[in-house]
Image (tube, rainbow, N blue to C red):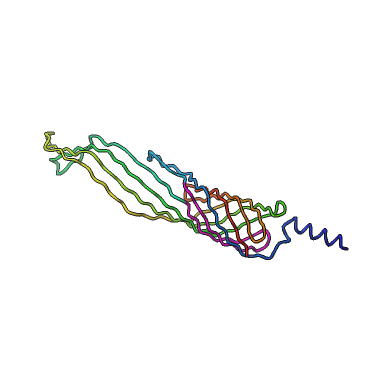
Amino acid sequence: MKFTALAILIALSSTGVYAEDKSFYLKASLGYMQFDSEDSFAVKEDLNSTGYALTFGYRINDYIAIEGGRANLGNISRDYEFTVRDSEIYYDYDEIVVENYDYKGTSESKLKSYSLGLAFSTQIQQNLNAGIRLGVHQWCVDIRSRSEYSGTRSWYTEDRELVSVEPYNSSYDWGSSKNSGSNPYYGAEVNWTTGDWGFSLEHTIYEIQDDTANLSSVGVTYSF
């Protein structure tokens, strides 16, 4: 009888069914963010930055949990450059302006995410678990951009006689523009637990329209 009870206890522990009754948990994750995105007009792109996520979860049972969270998906920086030569603009049908200038622009995007989804996990061995996460996230992007023009404007008569040449130097700070939407997210993790604490290696993919943000991170979880 004692041997049978011991065997049942070992079986429950090895399958992950036997566990302490800690339904709620908080997790903080910090890691490397990389964007799968490309702008064909940019001469330089910085698509890598630091990202972090904060997650609150409720375990329905030993295998399924409901999660809600907030993530900072890092920044995207882009530089733009092009040259305009002999661009003609007509004014009042009797004046012609010919522009020659160099253009430089910068753009920086900051992304945030608010998510709701499910986490599925199973025990690999004692204190070691593996799982997947999936759900929907609401992403928000804040874009700031600046443009600079440097060159000349030449004024001509209708008969192509040069009237004057003036510098064409200007800059514009376009301020901030925002965009948002909803897309799926999904990921996987391996978690090692000791008492109320857990330590994990994670990789989460956030879809953002036609692009993706990839967060490879380490996480610390506290169960209560």
- Magenta segment main secondary structure: strand
Q: Is residue 59 magenta?
A: yes
Q: Residue at x 24, y 45 (%)?
A: 170
Q: Residue at x 62, y 54 (%)?
A: 199
Residue 66 placement (x, y as % from top left): 60, 61
Q: Residue at x 50, y 50 (%)?
A: 207
Residue 101 placement (x, y as % from top left): 25, 38
Q: Quadrant of residue 102?
A: top left
Q: Quadrant of the N terminus?
A: bottom right
Q: Residue at x 16, y 43 (%)?
A: 91
Left or right of 148? Residue 215 is: right
Of 96 and 110, the residue lying toward us: 110
Of 188 and 159, the residue lying toward us: 188
Magenta segment, which residues? Answer: 49-73
Residue 14 placement (x, y as % from top left): 75, 55
Q: Quadrant of residue 5?
A: bottom right
Q: Is residue 188 magenta?
A: no
Q: Is residue 196 above or below residue 36?
A: below
Q: Is residue 196 above or below residue 189?
A: below
